[in-house]
Amino acid sequence: MSGPRQHGTRVTERLSPDVSGIARAAALLAQGRTVAFPTETVYGLGADAGDAAAIAAIYAAKDRPAFNPLIVHCTSIAQAEGVARFDDAARRLAAAFWPGPLTLVLPLRPGAPVADLALAGLPTLALRVPAHPLARALLAAFGGLVAAPSANPSGRISPTTADHVLDGLAGRIDAVLDGGACPVGVESTIIGWPAGIASLLRPGGLPVEAVEAALGIRLARPGTAAHGSDITAPGQLASHYAPAAPLRLNADAPGPCEAWLGFGPRDGRPGLTLSETGDLHEAAANLFGHLRMLDARVRAEGLTGIAAAPVPQHGLGLAINDRLARAAAPRPGIGTAGDDIPSEKGS
Ligand code: TXA
Ligand code: MG
């Protein structure tokens, strides 16, 4: 493992996943600094949720639009209930799935110690209790609420290793706690009750079927009339999670100048497969890393883009297909290595 890296204006410390690394990460958070840390989904870029300057540093490091609110990470359901109002349905989901890859969007309690900037002016708060042991150790050592979007430049692919974090943000953040690869690999499932309707705001690492089974109802899905959300958060805009290379979806096979992202057996084809055996959990864990590798291959070999095989639309397939669709959505500036998306930036 390499040491600290510097590309921008400061040295980003790489902290080891042990008692001293966790203590250093917690001390940095307490000083209002930005620290990336592993969760079971993806790496988050954390800061003290109550410290407006620290939250501003997150937005600056990511080049994230200030109208896109952050997820606040808690150690326990009790801590979460202190900052947001839970009804019976929210309590049932928290009891069933926390700690884990689920985010709940709930009414903020007046006076909750969360900086306005993290809320982006909304009366609701996105909350999550992560399951990753290092995230839990860091939250316990810090003691307070940690606001953390995914630790990538806005609009780019979320990081699932510390190296991914450093590739995008070295020199722009204070540290990364290196916990290896994130086991789930896609961001949390976000559930909210806009206009009182239980809605899937973002498919993610917790299968939507599990949420529906726990609630005993079908959730309103994005893009349907029943969906109560009129919130335009950049994370829900079409172009997002983008590699630099163009991405072609539902392909049978790669064209002569395309890199291949398969699903299922490779059958001798060059390229990568999300899962040889067609396992959706394995596919989710591989998704962002494989997109990064293929993106680099397109650049290095002068290919025209990435072709992706179809992925079944159930379980974690919803999240995988959502991220692939956003990565494939038309956007300005496509094909320019390393640049960000001038408009419709996401998280
Ligand atoms: O797995 C995850 O959720 C990771 C890890 C680090 O926890 N975090 C993550 O954060 O993916 P981020 O910021 O990249 O995505 C959070 C999404 C954004 O699309 C944001 O717009 C939405 O949550 N969001 C936050 N607060 C919201 C609110 N009050 N209402 C609706 N959407 C909200
Ligand atoms: Mg994000």
Image (tube, rainbow, N blue to C red):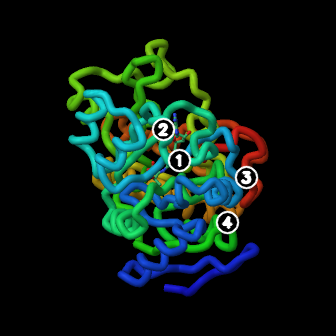
Q: Secondary structure at mark 3?
A: loop
Q: Nearer the viewer, residue 204 or 310?
A: 204
Q: Nearer the viewer, mark 1 or mark 4?
A: 1
Q: Nearer the viewer, mark 2 or mark 4?
A: 2
In this rendering, would 170 be left or right of 139?
Answer: right
Kindly identify which residue carries mark 4.
301
- Which sits earlier in the primary sequence, circle 3 or circle 4? 4
Whether label 2 touches label 4, CB < 8 Å: no
Callout 2: CB less than 8 Å from ligand 1: yes
- Please report the residue visible at 46 percent of the width from the left and 44 percent of the height from the top: 309
| Mark-to-mark CA distance, 2 and 4 | 44 Å
Q: Secondary structure at mark 2?
A: strand
Kindly identify which residue carries mark 3.
340
Q: Label 1 sits on what residue type?
A: Val
Whether label 2 touches label 1, CB < 8 Å: yes
Q: Label 4 sits on what residue type?
A: Glu
Kindly identify which residue carries mark 2.
125
- Which sits earlier in the primary sequence, circle 2 or circle 3? 2
In this rendering, would 88 be left or right of 26?
Answer: left
Q: Quadrant of residue 12?
A: bottom right
Q: Quadrant of residue 221?
A: top left
- Which sits earlier in the primary sequence, circle 1 or circle 4? 1
Kindly identify which residue carries mark 1.
114
- Which sits earlier in the primary sequence, circle 2 or circle 1? 1
Residue 38 visible in the shown view:
yes
Q: Secondary structure at mark 1?
A: loop
Q: Nearer the viewer, mark 2 or mark 3?
A: 2
Where residue 91 sits: x, y (%)? Answer: 26, 35
